[in-house]
Image (spheres, rainbow, N blue to C red):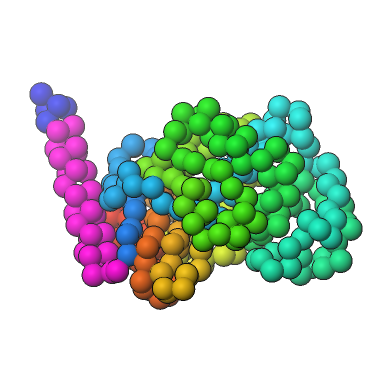
Amino acid sequence: MKYLGLIFFSTFFANASNESLKEVIESIIKTKHALVGVAISVLETGETVYINQEKHYPMQSVYKFHLSLAILKEVDDGKLSLEQKIHIKRSDLNARTWSPMQKKYPKANIDLSLSEILKYTISQSDNNGCDILFKLIGGPKKVNAYVHSLGIKDVSIVATEQQMQSNWNIQFKNYTSASAMTDLLSGFYFKRYLSEKTNAFLMQLMLETITGPKRIKGLLPDSVKVAHKTGTSGTNDDEVSAATNDIGIIFLPNGKHLAIAVFVSDSFEELESDEEIIAEISKAAYENFMKK
């Protein structure tokens, strides 16, 4: 009876703490002119905190994580190799998009390894790298089918970076729910999709991400490791931002890990404010689960 009482007390305390976190997050977003979707999961315990988690949010570059999972599955299956060289023509590098690769190799006509292209695509969010990988694997529909095969259904991947840039509305067809995102992150963390080698490779690329330093990582102690992937849309003619996103895994100093996804959509706020929303939510989650 004492043991059952302890379980009941622990569960009650956890639920109360998580409800308190939800209230804190709601207070962060209630005055913002934006739709904010949040999913947070403690990977070791399964505890979750959700807000607007079932709505569909445009992913923008967040979907490069999904693409990389599909590419690395092909590596595990022996269809691709991280060491194989891929020839990149000048026509493969769009100079009018975010592309550190294009800046380094403006004349192209180079051979880069698959591992290098993945690093550009994840760690630096290179749009040209993304579309080169889409071409390599057979297009967005193949990535979409792969993610669905993992049991993650509430996601849609139908357009490349180049296609998204051609029309503002196309980005909304590349969507996910916040809860589907943390479900995918959970499967990745527990190595359900990839081999030990490719899983570790992708985790390292996410740990080395240089984009979005003011988002999930923004208000956390510098010593805390975060493996993450950002996504950003810019604004339309009405000064509305479709997507300021960050998803990832926070390595808590107490040994636990948080899968976190924050999507800020349909925002009339400045980019700095959207990033502050993500940073404040991340900090609140960090402080809540560090107490346990």
* In the foreground, 168 or 73: 168
* In the foreground, 120 or 91: 91
Q: Quadrant of the N terminus?
A: top left
Whether the magenta-drawn stretch holds residue 13 is answered as: yes
- Answer with the quarter of the image where residue 143 lies: top right
Residue at 89% over, 58% down: 109
Above/below status of 225 relative to 15 = below
Above/below status of 11 relative to 171 = above
Can residue 227 be seen by looking at this rendering? no
Give coordinates of residue 153: x percent, y percent: 44, 33
Residue at 83% over, 41% down: 84
Is 112 situated left or right of 284 in this image? right
Above/below status of 16 relative to 219 = above
Give coordinates of residue 63: x percent, y percent: 55, 48
Is 27 situated left or right of 170 in this image? left
Above/below status of 228 relative to 144 = below
Is 97 situated left or right of 147 in this image? right
Is 64 situated left or right of 99 in this image? left
Main SS, magenta residues: helix
Q: Which residues are magenta?
A: 6-33
Whether the magenta-drawn stretch holds residue 130 is answered as: no
